[in-house]
Image (cartoon, rainbow, N blue to C red):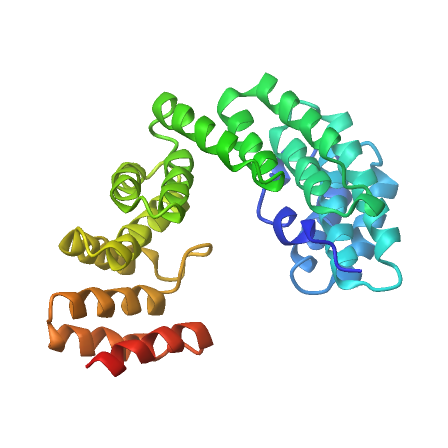
Amino acid sequence: MKLLYAIFLWLNLGWSLNSLQASDDLATLFKKASVALAIDLDEAESLIEKALSLEPNNPEVNFLCGRIMGRQAEDAIFTAMSYANKSLSCLKKAVEFQPNKIAYRIGLLKFYLGAPSIAGGDIELASEQVAAIYQLNSVQGALAEIKLLREQDKKDELKSKLIKWSAKYPKVNEFTFRLGLIYQEESNFREAFKVFEQAASSQEQQIYYLNSLYQLGRNAVFSHYNVQEGINSLLIFIAESDGYKGVPSNEWAALRLAQLYRLIENDEMTRKYAKLAEKSDERELHRVLKKIYNVR
């Protein structure tokens, strides 16, 4: 069984080896298990079980256990349920032992939202985590509620709250970025462009700053408005995003630039960026790229 929540849960939620209140042996096991998580899951599982035997009530160890067992559940077939149960147990213990740690509650929230109900997924329990996060930090609570509303497909409520949050927390550009995506999905391109501009004016959350730059260019492709602004945004995106995870590739940005230069009939720049886009091996990108060549 593949568990959907594992796609999201294993993002870097942050941990600090220095905060482990334990012996050198525990710290060594914890560090090795963290490294093994990306290399050898079976080794990571063995190491974290040893760490748990030393400090069963340590919240960081339990949280890492939740991550490792969740990854095992994602990859397993016959033992997926067993690993999912272990993951949930460890995540709940991490929250129990350190209830004020927002990262632990977010991890548990993502489990409840992403796992099938048979494996412990539960919208009501997810809602409880959102409420608890609100008590700790209003901004983090709102960010957590985004995840809940998106999972429930409550688009109208999400849009209404994003408008409110964007005004209340203008520097938290995840709010404005996601609002821009909604406007763009509605083909309200002019409003989307304004919102993406606001999101790109803050670098407080780098991933949403970069994604907003890309969306400004993509928006101009769709709408045929603000073409030069879209070009400028994509050039900045390419200069600042290389190797950054969680954003479109530079080849996709090059494709958007080729499309925009085509709109203003700059054949030289169209060819230049189309050539750069060709380096991608993504089928969808080449499908769109082919349309540019067919127009020329």
Residue 221 appears at what percent x and percent y? 26, 59
Most extreme residue toward the top is: 135
User: Up-down: is 138 above or below 108?
Assistant: above
In the image: residue 79, left or right of residue 275:
right
In the image: residue 202, left or right of residue 160:
left
Figure quadrant of the N terminus: bottom right
Regarding residue 86, the answer to whether it shows in the image is no
Residue 70 appears at what percent x and percent y? 75, 51
Q: Nearer the viewer, residue 14 or 173?
A: 173
Residue ID at (65%, 47%)? 9
Quadrant of residue 52 within the rendered picture: top right
In the image: residue 197, left or right of residue 38:
left
Quadrant of residue 91 within the rendered picture: top right
In the image: residue 256, left or right of residue 205:
left
Figure quadrant of the C terminus: bottom left
Q: Nearer the viewer, residue 265 or 140?
A: 265
Residue ID at (34%, 48%)? 187
Residue 118 appears at what percent x and percent y? 84, 46
Q: Nearer the viewer, residue 65 or 35?
A: 65
